[in-house]
Amino acid sequence: MANSVSKKAYAKINIGLDIVGKTDNGYHLLNSIMQQVDLYDVITVSREDEDGYSITIDSNNHDIPLDETNLAYKAADILMKEYKLSGKVSIYIDKRIPMAAGMAGGSTDGAAVLELINELFELGLSKDELKGIGVKLGADIPFCIEGKGAICQGIGEIMTPLGTAPDMAVLIAKPPISISTKYVYTHLKLDSVIHPDMDKVITAYKSGDLKTVADSMGNVLESVSEKENEIITSLKASMLEEGAVGSLMSGSGPTVFGLFEDMTLASKAGEKMKEKYPDVFIQAVNLIK
């Protein structure tokens, strides 16, 4: 049995995001394409024999919580309790995804820990079983376990893998601000937003029609986040000025991304935007397919 295992935990962007209603208990129902990109944290989980169990977290980024509030801790804890595991579990998060970015940085770490604990303790849980556990911790975790690209519906737990995606590169821009997801959803007015035609976006995405994807995608959460944070509008405009075929906010923000026809164009645009926005995290990435 291994004593230490590691894996990459990929960030995601939302290629279009619509909110189509609410559940009786107040959760918002979404319709979105979630797509993993080649920006990732590296998660390492180690174990030592001991009676009972303990969990510790460390990271190269001490701005993230290193206690039981971290989704990585919660992921380890739920499996240790549910399967009556024992031992000292140490989690190390090599943090590369910007924090509070709307890119599922915490969720992807939690998903990775579920997968690594499953491997480390040889639990033999299937991907579907892990997703069933993950949804108890957060709505984005099942997608992070599924990976690549998928149509996500319900509260995020209903997924249809896409299998294909247009040929493109993505430029990520995360400004140095934080936006409360709870605040955005609380102030979202569904009756007055413009809802994107997600069926059109999904059809175009599957067929590789990048232009139609770019022209049709939208994110209803921009109606709150962009209205209150001018930097989002500015970054979207700059993406288009630098050659993006389309630009959108990811999740509840504040990250903005631009879709480019290839990595050369995305990288050149990124260099120009770094000069204009020196305080913004900017990185060109490929899709995870």
Image (spheres, rainbow, N blue to C red):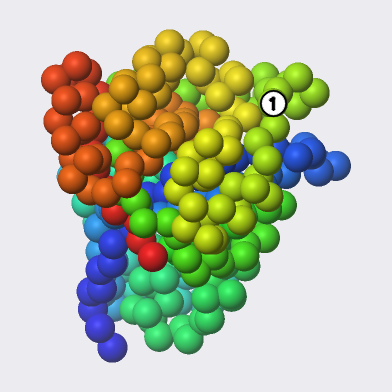
Position of 153 with respect to 37 (left or right) is right
Rendered location of residue 137, percent (x, y) = 57, 54
Give me the residue at 79% from left, 38% from top: 21
Work out whether residue 108 can be spotted.
no
Around disc 1, counting alpha carbons within 10 Å, would you say few (fewer than 14), some (14 to 19), or many (20 or more)? few
Position of 33 with respect to 258 (left or right) is right
Q: Looking at the rendering, which quadrant does residue 255 occupy?
A: top left
Give me the residue at 46% from left, 32% from top: 248
Q: Looking at the rendering, which quadrant does residue 102 occupy?
A: top left
Q: Is residue 127 above or below residue 199?
A: below
Q: Nearer the viewer, residue 262 or 26?
A: 262
Q: Is residue 156 above or below residue 49?
A: above
Give amino acid for label 1: Ile
Rendered location of residue 262, percent (x, y) = 27, 49
Q: Nearer the viewer, residue 202 or 45?
A: 202
Q: Secondary structure at mark 1?
A: loop
Q: Nearer the viewer, residue 229 or 145?
A: 229
Give me the residue at 21% from left, 32% from top: 269
Q: Is residue 226 above or below residue 197?
A: above
Rendered location of residue 230, percent (x, y) = 43, 11
Q: Is residue 250 above or below residue 3?
A: above
Look at the image and tell me in which quarter the N terminus lies: bottom left
Residue beneath disc 1: 194
Rendered location of residue 250, percent (x, y) = 47, 36
